[in-house]
Image (cartoon, rainbow, N blue to C red):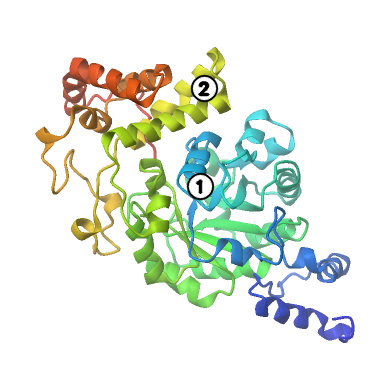
């Protein structure tokens, strides 16, 4: 490279990156300062976006975009014990943290720091810290904290969150309103950090017409990959994800595109990857319902755990929460904040073998379907009583199950206690649900 004439140096380096399967950077419509540009191009290690924690000559693309199933950033659900369950027990390879507000992270807020902190066993092979910001300086500062202090392998910029609290701050999906400003934000952050910057977007605000332009701008600005949730902000989760638009983006871009939306089973992920050509898939709600989806995806077959195996999974999460939160009174309060919420998703689990439920059109996803208490091939009255308890949507039931798991000495002890409370209270809880009253904690299930 040193022998190449200065006028052609940048072109040659970009070609070199493409040959190495690196995430390329196209010339931006707003030229960077010469000093920044020269420094980045002269530093091969920085320009190649090597991951911080191992990998040798592996590039970012090779680490995260070879057909894996990513764990999505999950509000409340992306706590460290749940990430550990997905990664350590079921083999999630790429894990992204819960979203942290960059401004408060940079100011040292304890809650925000906890959200992006990497822990033993909870990060898979590659850990990304997601931040929300609309300002370059606070984004850079937050990214440097996440990577330098907490060991994030890459940083993800949230440009898709539709929640009002995020929207009114001008964050999340609000960034899609002004694509040129978003490009400047991404370029400003990516040029000043030494780990890859990915960007998670939706297709737009109320239309997908700008999605391809936005993705192009993000690549030009220096994003190492783009995660595309195939819905608009206004659609939230009410429509099927549009993998046709995602396919168009994939065909036009040179950086990895990660698909997101409507993944409940391993074959959902496979079918959407094959249709769109994405480099990897990301799963959110599907993982909250059954964390073992990563095991299924890796093994390319469904795992239908017995009731006792399911209780064992939930008991393992309880153990991770006791280790992470503490087994004292404060730890119990944190457990009570999270575990019943998780049960609001766990109760949606149903066995969905591909030979019965596979082959559905992409615009009629299982995740958008109303599955009955018993599904095809099951008879409700034949289900074990603990299975019926685990499927109960009553939040009072979730509180009772949580108490049992917290106090149980073993999975066998938990099974005995769950059978006891099911015999005593399940009929009443199910009547409560049938009457439209799920219990005291009305916001357990989100998304």
Looking at the rendering, which quadrant does residue 349 occupy?
top left
Task: Give whichever of 217, 205 is nearer the camera.
Answer: 217
> Circle 2 sits in a helix, a strand or a loop, which is it?
helix
User: How many numbered badges does the structure rendering display?
Assistant: 2
Task: Give whichever of 159, 425 is nearer the camera.
Answer: 425
- Marked residue nearer the N-terminal end (1 or 2): 1
> Is residue 231 visible to the viewer in this orientation of the structure?
no
> Going 66% across and 80% down the picture, which residue do you hit?
19
Q: Residues within 10 Å of mark 1 (few under 14, many from 20)?
A: many
Q: Is residue 130 left or right of residue 391?
A: right
> Going 57% across and 28% down the picture, which residue do you hit?
324
Compared to 432, does 258 lie above or below? below
Q: Quadrant of the C terminus?
A: top left
Q: Which residue is mark 2?
A: 334
* Residue 174 point in image, percent of width and height: 55, 50
Looking at the rendering, which quadrant does residue 393 occupy?
top left
> Is residue 176 visible to the viewer in this orientation of the structure?
yes
Query: What whole-number distance in Å separates the C-alpha atoms at marks 1 and 2?
Result: 25 Å
Q: Residues within 10 Å of mark 2 (few under 14, many from 20)?
A: some
Q: Which residue is mark 1?
A: 161
Q: Is residue 174 left or right of residue 139?
A: left
> Circle 1 sits in a helix, a strand or a loop, which is it?
loop
Can you tell which mark lies on residue 377?
none
Task: Give whichever of 9, 374 is nearer the camera.
Answer: 374
């Amino acid at each position: 490279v040193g022998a190449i004439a200065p006028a052609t140096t940048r072109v040659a380096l970009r070609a070199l990156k493409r040959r190495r399967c690196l995430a390329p950077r196209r010339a931006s419509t707003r030229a960077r300062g010469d000093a920044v540009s020269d420094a980045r191009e002269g530093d091969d290690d920085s320009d190649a976006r090597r991951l911080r924690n191992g990998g040798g000559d592996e590039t970012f693309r090779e680490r995260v975009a070879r057909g894996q199933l990513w764990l999505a950033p999950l509000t409340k659900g992306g706590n460290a014990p749940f990430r550990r369950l997905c990664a350590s027990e079921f083999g999630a390879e790429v894990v992204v943290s819960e979203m942290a507000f960059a401004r408060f992270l940079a100011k040292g807020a304890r809650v925000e720091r906890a959200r992006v902190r990497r822990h033993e066993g909870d990060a898979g092979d590659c850990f990304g810290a997601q931040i929300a910001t609309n300002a370059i300086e606070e984004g850079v500062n937050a990214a440097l904290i996440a990577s330098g202090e907490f060991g994030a392998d890459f940083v993800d910029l949230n440009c898709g969150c539709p929640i009002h609290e995020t929207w009114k701050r001008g964050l999340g999906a609000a960034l899609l309103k002004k694509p040129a400003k978003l490009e400047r934000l991404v370029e400003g952050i990516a040029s000043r950090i030494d780990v890859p910057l990915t960007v998670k977007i939706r297709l737009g605000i109320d239309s997908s017409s700008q999605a391809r332009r936005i993705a192009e701008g993000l690549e030009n600005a220096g994003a190492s990959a783009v995660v595309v949730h195939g819905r608009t902000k206004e659609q939230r989760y009410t429509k099927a994800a549009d993998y046709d638009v995602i396919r168009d983006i994939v065909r036009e871009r040179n950086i990895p595109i990660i698909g997101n939306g409507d993944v409940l089973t391993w074959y959902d992920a496979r079918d959407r990857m094959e249709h769109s050509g994405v480099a990897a898939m990301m799963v959110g709600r599907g993982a909250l319902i059954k964390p073992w989806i990563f095991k299924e995806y890796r093994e390319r077959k469904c795992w239908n755990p017995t009731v006792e195996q399911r209780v064992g999974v939930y008991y393992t999460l309880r153990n991770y929460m006791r280790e992470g939160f503490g087994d004292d009174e404060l730890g119990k309060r944190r457990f009570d904040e999270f575990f019943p919420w998780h049960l609001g998703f766990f109760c949606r689990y149903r066995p969905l073998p591909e030979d019965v439920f596979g082959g559905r059109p992409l615009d009629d996803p299982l995740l958008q379907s109303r599955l009955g208490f018993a599904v095809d091939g099951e008879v409700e009255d034949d289900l074990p009583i603990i299975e019926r308890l685990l499927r109960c949507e009553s939040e009072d039931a979730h509180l009772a199950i949580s108490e049992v798991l917290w106090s149980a000495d073993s999975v066998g002890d938990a099974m005995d206690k769950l059978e006891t409370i099911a015999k005593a209270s399940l009929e009443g809880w199910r009547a409560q649900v049938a009457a439209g009253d799920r219990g005291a904690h009305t916001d357990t299930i989100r998304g």
